[in-house]
Structure formats: structure tokens, C-alpha cells
Amino acid sequence: MSLVDFPDKLCMNLIVPGCNYRCSFCPHEQLIHHHIPMPKIGMAEIVKLLRPRMGFLDGVSLGGGEPFLHRGLGSFLSEMRFQNIKVRIKTNASRPGAIQWVLDEKLIDFLSVFIPAPLSKYADVVNYRIDPKDVRRSIQIVRKSNVAHEFRVKPVPGLVEQEDILEIANTLSGSRRLVIERFDPSHTLDPEICGSDVFSQSELEDIRDSTSPYFGEVILSN
């Protein structure tokens, strides 16, 4: 259960494996490498878990991994709608067509969009060949939608510096909300940066203050 993943709502966190990005600072190795086993829970079991909790639970938060890589996502979201369960999805912005579809079908209530790097160095940071136009299109789709949303960034010394966050902020200028995530060096996809330096609290506050003019709200996550 969480009170922070779905703003102002108590939600159940659901995690899906598989991601097309290979960000070196990713803390979720088990979601990326298929040789690491994870328990599988079917939709019927999820609904069974949710039903007795709907008296106090506001919805579910679906993250990963990248949820939009999964073919069964539409069926899952339709079932959540049928059960009158609100859904928040966290995405890496790599699938603009899928994002547009779930918005057109009115299947989600909140979108959290992680932008790991400025578009100028996107492929180098995510270690995946992606057309920056797809990311930009995802951003435009989300911003034009009527669905509540936020963008998220993660400053990482040596990889995603303060000037990179400012470049991202400029791309997202005029958006409602930015969340600045903290880099956790204790768990990283690339073992070479495990235990590396982090930005200090004062440096993160400087990043927050410098990006504030671009957004309606900037939050430094715990």
C-alpha cells in the first residue's frame, strides 16, 4: 500500500517486469533481467485482492518496468474500469501510440511520466536506440490530455547533472507538476556505479528551486 505513488490517494502498488531501457542507475534489476524469477499474479487474483479493500483503497498504481510493453495491459485496465478502480500508470514515454490509446479509451486516471535524460543525450543515458521524436510526442500527448499527470526526473552525478535537469525542465516548460526523485546508489543496474556519489540535500533543493519557474509545482521526493 502507498500514500505517495498516487497523489492524495491510498493505492496498491502493482509492479510489472520488463523494460526496453537499460538506465545504469535503475534500481530494479529484477524487473529487467529475465533470469531473475518473479512471482506471477493473474488478473483474477488481483481483483480478488482488491475487492475486500475497496472500502478504504482508492486505486492501484501500476509501474515497473514499463507497463506499456505488455499486450495484456488493455484488458487489465478495462477490468479495473469495470471494477470501478482508479489507475495510475508510471511510464518511460517510449510508447506514444499506447499512451494515446489508453487516454482515448479513458482507461486511466493518472499518468506519471519518467524522463530519464534530456532529449539531446537520451539514447546515451537509457542505452536504447529510441527516436527522441517518440519521447517528445509522448510528452505532448500527456500535456494535452485532461488526465491528471506529472513528470519525474532523477539527478545522478556524472550522468544526469543539474544542467541536464534544467534542459528537461525547458522541454517540459508549462507543465503542471515535476517530481525530483532521489538516486539510490545502493541498488543499480550497472554495478560500476553502485555506491557512487549522490547529490546532497542542498544540491537537490537548488535543482528544485531552479526548475520551479517552469512548472506549477515542483516536489522533491523522499
Image: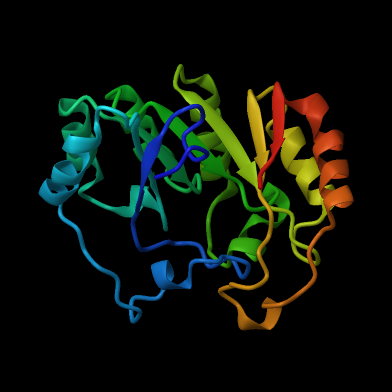
Q: Is residue 206 above or below residue 212?
A: below
On screen, residue 56 above or below 162: above
User: Residue 163, image x and y in percent?
Assistant: 85, 49
What residue occupies the far top of the structure in this picture?
A: 146
In percent of width and height, residue 89 lies at: 41, 40
Residue 25 image-quadrant placement: bottom right
Q: Residue at x 38, y 31 (%)?
A: 100
Horizontal and vertical percent for residue 56?
Answer: 31, 29
Q: Quadrant of residue 218?
A: top right
The residue depicted at 24 percent of the width and 30 percent of the height is 54
**Residue at 87% in and 51% down:** 203
Residue farthest to the left, as pictured: 44
Look at the image and tell me in which quarter the N terminus lies.
Answer: top left
Q: Residue at horizontal 17%, vertical 40%? A: 75
Q: Is residue 51 left or right of residue 22?
A: left
Above/below status of 71 relative to 158? above
Does residue 88 sit above or below 128 in this rendering? Answer: above
**Left or right placement of residue 114 versus residue 29 in this view:** right
Q: Position of residue 24 (x, y in %)?
A: 61, 70
